[in-house]
């Protein structure tokens, strides 16, 4: 079959819904200043879908730093890949400050988070090595693992007993091949909100010889006494060998970095194909990241404000009988029972009649019969926002339980 004909016939699990979902449930346009209240299709909505954890996206000092960086350097500078002609003192300064912040000897800037994780995995392991990874790892980890030419074993999410069994399998294999073992997991899981069992994994080092690579995209800035992330929060930074962080969450920007031993970071600097064959991170993003890091270091109250909102939202939802799963972080999933038509009608009701905008997750991301509404609280939400949202959730949950969303299309739902 012609490739394009096949694509036209099979749009994929998400694309198959695009005829009605595009622009509303998928690829929606939130407009206006990045704040809790934004514009959606001409209406003001209270938004819980942005990973602007610390509220830095619209911070005046951040906005000014971005402006100054663009004015002084433009978006082109520095030209070329860093290995050839795109390095700068500011790039190196940012790496040094990031490494110091997350309590690791060295750090390497990355242009993008998703691409960075894929390329880190590709660079770290060879065909004789074995990867052991958490089943609920982010798609960037899954794609990186797929590139691996050697063996890989998966363990059920946070199942340490099963991880030990997979390590035993991996050890038998590497004893024969002379390869090594890389365990990959996340710090804070972005869908469930629970934390990777980093302490328990580190403890297994006493029994097995392996290295740990952690994707802590959501943990940076939100967890730990200084905001250095999940490993700091759990008190096991030294035992976690290599940690990835993104600028796309708490830093409210673009880019990422990986931190770990100096020798490993130096190896990645010269062997990550996505970096050595790509243009350097533009200077305005570097200047902006320096300002964002300064604010995170010097203003712990941003993180404290975030957790005030998190605690109010999560405790309030639980008091009203909502199931928020096993979250241990700001990520707040709300699990309801219903099918995809119920989910679309309920979401329409929330947005059009209650002015609440949050992400909706349905099968195949969650099991059939489950609707997950994903809330991302931030430091700039208010307790009034929390109460308004919980009240709206109570209303739509009652309608869902009565089967009202199954009786009429989404467009006919009214307050």
Image (cartoon, rainbow, N blue to C red):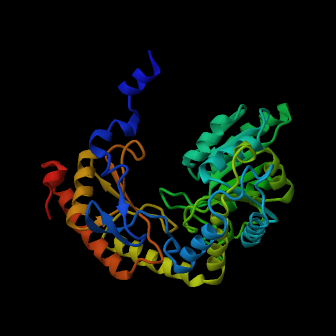
The residue drawn where x is 77% and y is 69% is 93
The residue drawn where x is 26% and y is 73% is 391
Left or right, residue 318 beside residue 230: left
The residue drawn where x is 49% and y is 64% is 51
- Residue 179 location (% of width, % of height): 82, 37
- Residue 327 location (% of width, % of height): 48, 64
Residue 27 in view (yes/no): yes
- Residue 116 location (% of width, % of height): 66, 50
- Residue 340 location (% of width, % of height): 28, 45
The residue drawn where x is 87% and y is 55% is 263
| Residue furthest top in the image | 1
Q: Give the vertical position of 158 relative to 326 (above or below).
A: above
- Say which quadrant the C terminus sits in: bottom left
Q: Give the vertical position of 399 relative to 272 (above or below).
A: below
Left or right, residue 136 beside residue 392: right
Quarter-of-image position of residue 41: bottom left
From the viewer's side, name the closer residue of 348 and 284.
284
- Say which quadrant the N terminus sits in: top left
Left or right, residue 59 beside residue 247: left
From the viewer's side, name the closer residue of 63 and 375.
63
Quarter-of-image position of residue 123: top right
Q: How many marks?
A: 0
Residue 403 in view (yes/no): no
Quarter-of-image position of residue 131: top right
């Amino acid at each position: 079959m012609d490739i394009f004909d096949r694509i036209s016939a099979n749009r994929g699990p998400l694309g198959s819904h695009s005829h009605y979902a595009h622009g509303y449930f998928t690829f929606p346009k939130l407009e206006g200043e990045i704040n809790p209240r934004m514009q959606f299709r001409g209406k003001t909505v209270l938004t819980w879908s942005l990973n602007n954890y610390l509220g830095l996206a619209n911070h005046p000092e951040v906005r000014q730093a971005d402006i100054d960086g663009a004015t002084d350097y433009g978006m082109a500078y520095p030209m070329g890949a860093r290995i050839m002609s795109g390095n700068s003192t500011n790039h190196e300064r940012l790496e040094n400050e990031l490494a110091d912040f997350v309590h690791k000897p060295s750090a390497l800037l990355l242009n993008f988070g998703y691409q960075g994780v894929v390329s880190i995995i590709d660079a770290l392991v060879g065909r004789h090595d074995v990867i052991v990874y958490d089943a609920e790892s982010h798609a960037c980890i899954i794609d990186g693992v797929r590139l691996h030419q050697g063996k890989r074993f998966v363990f059920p999410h946070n199942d340490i007993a099963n991880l030990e069994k997979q390590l035993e399998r991996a050890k038998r294999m590497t004893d024969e091949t002379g390869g090594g073992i890389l365990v990959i997991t996340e710090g804070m899981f972005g869908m469930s909100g629970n934390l990777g069992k980093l302490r328990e994994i580190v403890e297994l080092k006493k029994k097995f010889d392996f290295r740990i690579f952690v994707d802590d995209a959501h943990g940076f800035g939100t967890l730990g006494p200084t905001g250095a992330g999940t490993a700091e929060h759990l008190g096991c930074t030294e035992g976690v060998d290599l940690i990835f962080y993104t600028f796309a969450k708490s830093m409210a920007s673009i880019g990422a970095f990986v931190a770990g031993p100096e020798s490993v970071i130096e190896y990645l600097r010269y062997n990550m194909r996505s970096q050595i064959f790509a243009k350097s991170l533009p200077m305005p993003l570097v200047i902006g990241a320096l300002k964002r890091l300064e604010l995170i270091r010097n203003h712990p109250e941003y993180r404290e404000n975030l957790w005030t909102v998190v605690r109010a939202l999560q405790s309030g939802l639980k008091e009203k009988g909502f199931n928020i799963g096993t979250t241990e972080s700001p990520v707040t999933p709300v699990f309801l029972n219903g099918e995809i038509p119920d989910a679309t009608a309920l979401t329409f009701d929330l947005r059009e009649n209650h002015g609440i905008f949050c992400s909706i997750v349905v099968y195949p991301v969650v099991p059939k019969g489950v609707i997950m509404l994903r809330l991302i609280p931030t430091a700039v939400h208010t307790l009034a926002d929390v109460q308004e949202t919980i009240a709206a959730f109570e209303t739509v949950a009652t309608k869902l339980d009565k089967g009202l969303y199954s009786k009429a299309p989404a467009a006919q739902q009214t307050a």
